[in-house]
Amino acid sequence: MNPSQFDTYDSTQDAEVRAQLCAYNTAFDELGLRFRWDARTLASLATIDGEEARITAYIETHHAHLLNAYSAEFLSRAILEKKNARYPACLPVRVESAPHQSQGAPQPQMSSRRERVSYDVELPALAGI
């Protein structure tokens, strides 16, 4: 598949992924959280059913220190509320089938050029941390 066919094939999915990432990363920024999701992070969480559960799993795995000051439920709801204010659509659960996985290495969801977009911004820490 040449690059133009790849871009056409994945353009709808890429637009959805970009919209989801923008909404989540804007929510994190508005709440003063110092983390950012990329396409790889979003894809790794896509097997978890429910947005609130995805956010909770991410926080528990990567930012457990926040749970010393805030409950996982509070944080995930706050993030989801901000995210939904910007983009209420939910990224569907991704179910990988056995035949698809055996066809070789998985194809990237976004081109490397798009994955290099950086959301690194210095943000203040949450109060009390």
Image: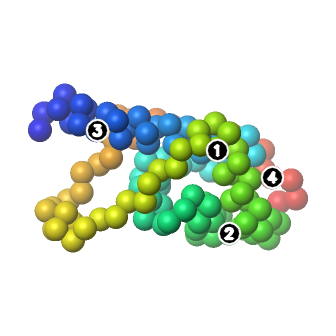
Determine which quarter of the picture holds residue 98: bottom left
Which residue is found at the position 83% from the left and 66% from the top? 69
Label 2 sits on what residue type?
Ala
Q: CA distance from mark 3 to mark 4?
A: 37 Å
Element type where label 1 sits in the image: helix
Mark 4 — residue?
A: 126
Element type where label 3 sits in the image: helix
* Disc 4: CA contacts within 10 A as few (<14), some (14-19) or many (>=20): few
Q: Nearer the viewer, residue 107 or 82?
A: 82
123 to the left or right of 111? right
Q: Which of the marked residues, 2 or 4, is nearer the chain's N terminus?
A: 2
Mark 3 and mark 2 in contact? Answer it, CB < 8 Å: no
Mark 1 and mark 2 in contact? Answer it, CB < 8 Å: no
Which residue is found at the position 43% from the left and 60% from the top? 93
How many numbered marks are there?
A: 4
Label 4 sits on what residue type?
Leu
Q: CA distance from mark 3 to mark 2?
A: 34 Å
Label 1 sits on what residue type?
Lys
Mark 3 — residue?
A: 10
Q: Position of residue 107 (x, y in %)?
A: 24, 51
The residue at the far right in this view is: 128
Q: CA distance from mark 2 to mark 4?
A: 14 Å
66 to the left or right of 56? right
Mark 2 — residue?
A: 64
Which residue is found at the position 63% from the left and 70% from the top? 60
Which residue is found at the position 47% from the left and 61% from the top? 45
92 to the left or right of 11? right
Mark 1 — residue?
A: 83
